[in-house]
Image (cartoon, rainbow, N blue to C red):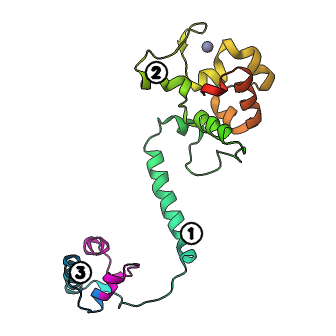
Amino acid sequence: MAFDLIESSDNHHFIVFTDSLSSLLALKGHELKHPSVTALREAYSNLVRLQKSVMDVTNIYLPHTDYRPKINGFVKSKWEELWDAFPENKLYQVKPRAGTGGHRAAPSKRRDDIVLARAYIGHTYLTHAYLLHGEERPYCIPCDCAVTVIHILVDCHEYSHIRQKYYAVPDLKTLLERTDFSLILGFLKESRLYRNF
Ligand SMILES: [Zn+2]
């Protein structure tokens, strides 16, 4: 795969890092009878013909920590691109930048973590179990609208008397970014929504 990328690249100088001993031995000229080794040597010769310079095969110690910031940056940029490609994803409204801040120091209890993660994603058992069971989408009769995470956490009149004891926010973004998690969890517990959230 590395050789394929090199072949199609406009650059001329490359370093390939691999932990595949058989690949390295093959390139060093050791006789290894395996179809993939033969293919590898052919690909390598091909690159030499194309005047792509791949450094001599060396066995050097590379502390992975040297590359971690580069790799992290690269992965994050790819993740960022993917994130931007889906601005209508529910989490995008709360967290327009992937991987930065947003999900603040998480509480320790596992169930609390799950509940908060579901609030972020906008998918909860309460709002989406109907898909699993092939039922009608849940509907909030007092408010005359579909039951969604935003509706439960921010808008629903049914729970407003409980909610106001814990927080008062205009939207989900403010709730998830500025409200203490314990208050959100407190509201869900008192309103008995926590178990099915
Ligand atoms: Zn409602």
Question: Magenta segment range?
Answer: 1-25
Q: Does 19 sit left or right of 41 as displayed? A: right
| Farthest right residue in view | 165
Q: Is residue 87 above or below residue 4?
A: above
Per the image, label 1 sits on a secondary structure element best described as helix
Q: How crowded is mark 3: few (under 14 residues within 10 Å), some or many (20 or more)?
A: some
Q: Indicate which quadrant contains ligand 1.
A: top right
Q: How crowded is mark 1: few (under 14 residues within 10 Å), some or many (20 or more)?
A: few
Q: Is residue 168 above or below residue 120?
A: above
Per the image, label 3 sits on a secondary structure element best described as helix
Kindly check if marks 2 and 3 are in contact, taking CB atoms under 8 A apart as contact.
no
4 drawn magenta: yes
Determine the image quadrant of residue 140: top right
Residue labelled with disc 3: 37
Determine the image quadrant of residue 191: top right
Residue labelled with disc 1: 69
Q: Does 25 sit left or right of 69 as displayed? A: left
153 drawn magenta: no
Of the two numbered discs 1 and 2 on the same chain, state the one appearing first in sequence: 1
Q: How crowded is mark 2: few (under 14 residues within 10 Å), some or many (20 or more)?
A: few
Residue labelled with disc 2: 130
Which residue type carries mark 1? Pro
Distance CA(mark 3)–CA(mark 1): 32 Å
Q: Please state the horizontal and vertical placement of residue 48, each as a whole percent of the image.
A: 23, 86
Which residue type carries mark 3? Val
Distance CA(mark 2)–CA(mark 3): 53 Å
Give me the residue at 43% from left, 26% from top. Answer: 132
Q: Can residue 41 be seen in this view?
A: yes
